[in-house]
Image: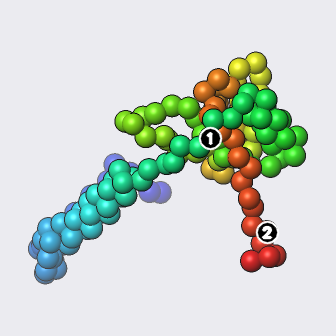
Amino acid sequence: MYDKSEEENIVINPNTSGYVDREMAKWQGLILSEHTEVVHEEKRQSRKVNREKEKQSLEAISELIDYSYRQKIPVAIQLDCLFDGKYEDDIIGVVCGYFEQHVYVQTIESEVIVCEFDLIRNVEEVKQTKWFSV
């Protein structure tokens, strides 16, 4: 029978077994490449400017939201909010419900985003490319 109390912990030290390591050089290279990637992504995001879309009437917004809900058609919703003087990225997804002053949009990533109806600036139907017409 195996007894855990008699188990010995064996520690393998690469330095004593003759393994020659490049020390921290490989880790610094890994960290440097990841850091460079993050810096480039931040620069891309800071230069990105979303254009201001036409302010639609409440009737037009309601029609497109209802159409997306009934037909399961994806739409792009631009909110009428500025962050640091820029418009945020459009919310792209299918309207999965609406109640009173809230619209529920299921995005491609399968998360549900809740938008206030009064904050919606523009709604557009997203053109889908069919797989068989590519």
Q: Quadrant of the C terminus?
A: bottom right
Looking at the picture, how far across and down is residue 42, in whole percent?
33, 53
Tag 1's secondary structure? loop
- Amino acid type, mark 1: Glu
Residue occupying the point 84% across, 41% down: 67
Among the 4 quarters of the image, the one containing residue 55: top right
Among the 4 quarters of the image, the one containing residue 53: top right
On screen, residue 46 versus residue 127, left or right, reads left
Looking at the picture, how far across and down is residue 99, in whole percent?
77, 22
On screen, residue 29 versus residue 70, left or right, reads left
The relative height of residue 84 versus residue 24 in the rendered view (above or below) is above
On screen, residue 52 versus residue 28, left or right, reads right
Mark 2 Cα-neighbour bin, 10 Å: few <14, some 14–19, many ≥20? few
Residue occupying the point 31% across, 61% down: 40
The relative height of residue 63 versus residue 24 in the rendered view (above or below) is above
Mark 1 Cα-neighbour bin, 10 Å: few <14, some 14–19, many ≥20? few
Q: Is residue 13 visible?
A: no
Towards the viewer: 53 or 72:
53
Callout in the foreground (2, 1): 1
The relative height of residue 14 versus residue 64 in the rendered view (above or below) is below
First of labels 2, 1 by sequence position: 1
Tag 2's secondary structure? loop
Residue occupying the point 42% across, 53% down: 48
- Residue pointed to by mark 2: 130
Label ID, residue 123: none
- Residue pointed to by mark 1: 54
- Amino acid type, mark 2: Lys
Looking at the picture, how far across and down is residue 63, in whole percent?
82, 35
Residue occupying the point 80% across, 49% down: 73
The relative height of residue 16 versus residue 52 in the rendered view (above or below) is below
